[in-house]
Amino acid sequence: MSKIISNAVAKVNLTLRIIRDEIGAAGYHRIESLFVFLGGIYDTLELDDTAPFNESSGAIAGVKNSDNSVRTAFKILVDNFDRPAPDVRITKRLPICGGIGGGSSDAACFINSVFDYWSMSLQEKLSCVNMFDALGSDAKIFLYKYFWKCDSLYALGTGLDNPPVVINLPINGYVVLVNAGDTLSTKTAYEKFAGPYCDEIGVNEIMNQLRRNGVAYNSLAAAAIQLAPSIRSVLSNVRETQPTLYGLSGSGPTCFGVYDSLPAAQVAATLLRRSATFVAISPLATYAGITNPMPSTSSSSAL
């Protein structure tokens, strides 16, 4: 091998419910969330084994090395494996601190690509998941996404305790992501969260609520809007384009709309670009993965 080129994809949370007034492992809240990964919106990572990982590897404009999740992932690899890791270059497209998993996805994609470079099996990869706790719960979700090659996952817990479950979602269409140019760290949004807390409801009820309401419930929405008031107008603008489903992804500030067809998504994107700095479209895939790693869950409630 001389080069491996991989896409570090975006995610949206179709639901994010903070379910207990209790802090779990490593200070993380317990959540119930439905993650969907967007293959059409991504950063690109290029691994090149003609040079070793070095001081400029994984550099991202505007991000200090100490805050760079790919460089943190490399340090974990060095601390745990006596194997060389190749140089990596990142073409950044996803907004930084945008609530769509940019840094977490980059780190997990890098780890998976290095494991592929080392010719590790799926079981070998899975046995290493817990060594990456320091990267945070979203990065571990992305690790499962890349290891299992699936498009949607249901997570219950802190993200560091229980593995997620592969979900077969009866959803089709196109997602439009919209960001007005703000940034918002996950840590800051969770610190601002003041309730209310939710009960666990399970995948089928989540899907029923999405179908009934057309709005993706997000426990962090109120906190995120307080921190980045532009989210309110972005959500309003998305709603006016008449999506089948819309909401705030993760801790924000990126919002999303789901549309039945590509032409509908393109019309919406054109309108939303008038007031946003980042607008992107992706098919909403429902591929269940290369394997059935855990008892998968299906929902019978189509949007």
Image (tube, helix red, strand yellow):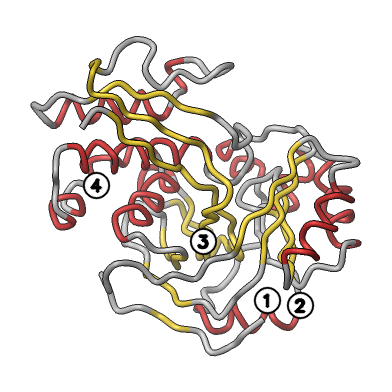
Residue visible at 44% across and 70% down in the picture: 287
Q: Is residue 51 left or right of residue 152?
A: left
> Which of disc 3 and disc 4 is earlier in sequence?
3
Q: Dot 4 corresponds to which residue?
A: 130
Q: The disc labelled 2 sits on which kind of residue?
A: Asn
Q: Dot 2 corresponds to which residue?
A: 213
Q: Are marks 1 and 2 in contact (CB under 8 Å)?
A: yes
Residue visible at 29% across and 54% down in the picture: 147
Q: The disc labelled 4 sits on which kind of residue?
A: Asn
Q: Dot 1 corresponds to which residue?
A: 210
Q: Where's the N terminus, which quadrant?
A: top left
Q: The disc labelled 1 sits on which kind of residue?
A: Leu
Q: Is residue 164 left or right of residue 237?
A: left
Gap in Å between the C-alphas at discs 3 and 1? 14 Å
- Judge by depth and name the residue closer to the eye, 253 or 23: 253
Q: Nearer the viewer, mark 4 or mark 3?
A: 3
Q: Could you classify mark 3 by the number of other residues whose Cα lies within 10 Å: few (under 14), some (14-19), or many (20 or more)?
A: many
Which of the labelled discs sits on residue 85, or is there none?
A: none
- Judge by depth and name the residue closer to the eye, 102 or 46: 46
